[in-house]
Amino acid sequence: MERNAGKTNVAVIGAGPAGLMAAEAAARAGALVRIFDRMPSPARKFLMAGKSGLNITHVEAGTRTPYGCPPLMPMVDAFGPEAIRDWMADLGQASFTGSTGRIFPKAMKASPLLRAWLSRLDGLGVTLDRRAEWTGWSEDALTFADGTRVTQDATVLALGGASWRRLGSDGGWTARMPEHVTPFASANVGFVVDWSDHMTRHFGAPVKNTGLIVGGITHRGEFTLSARGLEGGGIYPLTPQLRNGAALALDLKPDLTEAEVRARLARRGKASLSTHLRKAPRLSAVQIALLQEFARPLPDDLAPILKHLPVPLRGPRPMDEAISTAGGLRWDAVDDTLMLRDRPGTFAAGEMLDWEAPTGGYLLTACLATGRWAGRHAAAWAQR
Ligand SMILES: Cc1cc2nc3c(=O)[nH]c(=O)nc-3n(C[C@H](O)[C@H](O)[C@H](O)COP(=O)(O)OP(=O)(O)OC[C@H]3O[C@@H](n4cnc5c(N)ncnc54)[C@H](O)[C@@H]3O)c2cc1C
């Protein structure tokens, strides 16, 4: 790496949101920053996240601690939802809070924010080497697939998790430090169900007003049926329990007690069963289809099965389809500045660290917060 008089050099490997934020923080702290990414263009997963509305943070990201990961919290406290909104506003991107506390840029997409961000980084003197695949270390130098070796005063690794490999992150970095890694697992992912042919016409249908019962607790949230199984925001937060084998059951009338459901079902008259189910307890077509799929032959007393309909799951969809991954670099492998204990001067940030969170803006919040933390500390280390 070229030396620039009076400046220290910080390398950032990975141009996702964590790496870009690390680069911004290190450059603001006075370092000369060079980013490397294996892909021809930066932040492909960030852009993909923006396709369905970039949910960048959540009003409760700092308070509700959905991460279950105490070492992460000082970082999220230092760069939480308010700070992220201010940072976006500085980049010309106004934001709004949705009814469930999720925060989005008004433009909804990631591309205007990314354009403004890259332009800011350019102004800070940060450079980006594209198609630069980091392969490890040779003594103190970073090595790349084309044979290049780069020495630096400090390095931030922001190599991502192990899903959606076509966007750049494949978890291959774990081979460089296997002793410090908790194996990756799918997070925020759909679950496989073997449907009968009768269910085909319900694929794509949203299932509303239904409780998802896992471990004795009923969760509320919408999900959809697809040819592959169950997907969507209601099912994703349950991934940690479901991937560990917990059973799923549905409560098709979560606002009624079993006795109230039974009372509603009492007078069927001459109506067909499906008309009765539609009219008396007011089940939707897709709820009736789920009942027929999993509870046949139907018992005479339908109330218990409406309140607790077991759904046989055949495991999570493949990890490459997951929105995020659990596992990664263990917290005992880094100190409280996010520096690798056995490689002083090398820091880690983003989804490659071992935390997991539901969708809702918590993922990007933790990536940005750890990126900023690692970038600042890398610059300080370089200048020490
Ligand atoms: C479809 C989808 C929708 C999502 N929606 C949301 C959302 O709305 N809200 C939210 O909070 N989160 C969302 N996420 C998750 C979020 O995008 C990720 O958690 C986040 O991008 C992770 O950031 P990161 O910087 O840690 O890693 P990444 O974004 O994965 O970036 C890592 C970078 O490292 C590079 N890299 C990897 N290995 C090497 C190597 N050996 N050499 C050089 N470069 C390398 C990769 O090319 C990549 O550019 C979504 C994810 C997906 C897939």
Image: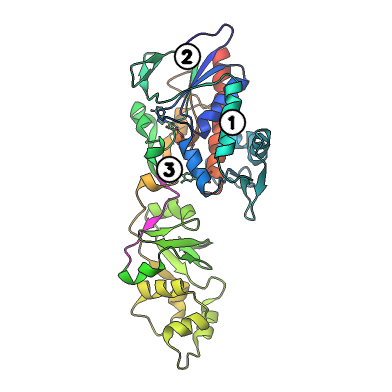
Kindly state the secondary structure of the residue where label 1 is placed. helix
Q: Position of residue 357 (x, y in %)?
A: 51, 45
* 118 in relation to 81, above or below: above
Give the crowd class for mark 1: few <14, some 14-19, many >=20 residues within 10 Å: many
Tell me which residue sits at (48%, 43%) in the image: 48
Residue 199, labelled with which disc? none
Q: In the rendered structure, which disc, 3 or 2, sits on the residue that comes first in sequence?
A: 2
Q: Position of residue 11 (x, y in %)?
A: 48, 20
Label 1 vs label 3, nearer the camera: 1
Give the magenta part as a residue range: 186-195
Query: Does the magenta run of residues contain 191?
Result: yes
Residue 117, labelled with which disc? 1
The amino acid pointed to by label 3 is: Thr
Give the crowd class for mark 3: few <14, some 14-19, many >=20 residues within 10 Å: many
The amino acid pointed to by label 1 is: Trp
* 1 in relation to 181, above or below: above
Q: Based on the displayed image, in which of its 4 quarters is residue 380 positioned?
A: top right
Tell me which residue sits at (31%, 69%) in the image: 196
| C-alpha span from label 1 to label 2 | 24 Å
Q: Where is residue 339 in the image (x, y as percent from the top left)?
A: 50, 24
Pointer 2: what residue? 152
Front-lying residue, 315 or 190: 190
Front-lying residue, 274 or 304: 274
20 displayed left or right of 225: right
Pointer 3: what residue? 325
Give the crowd class for mark 2: few <14, some 14-19, many >=20 residues within 10 Å: many
Query: Does the magenta run of residues contain 151?
Result: no
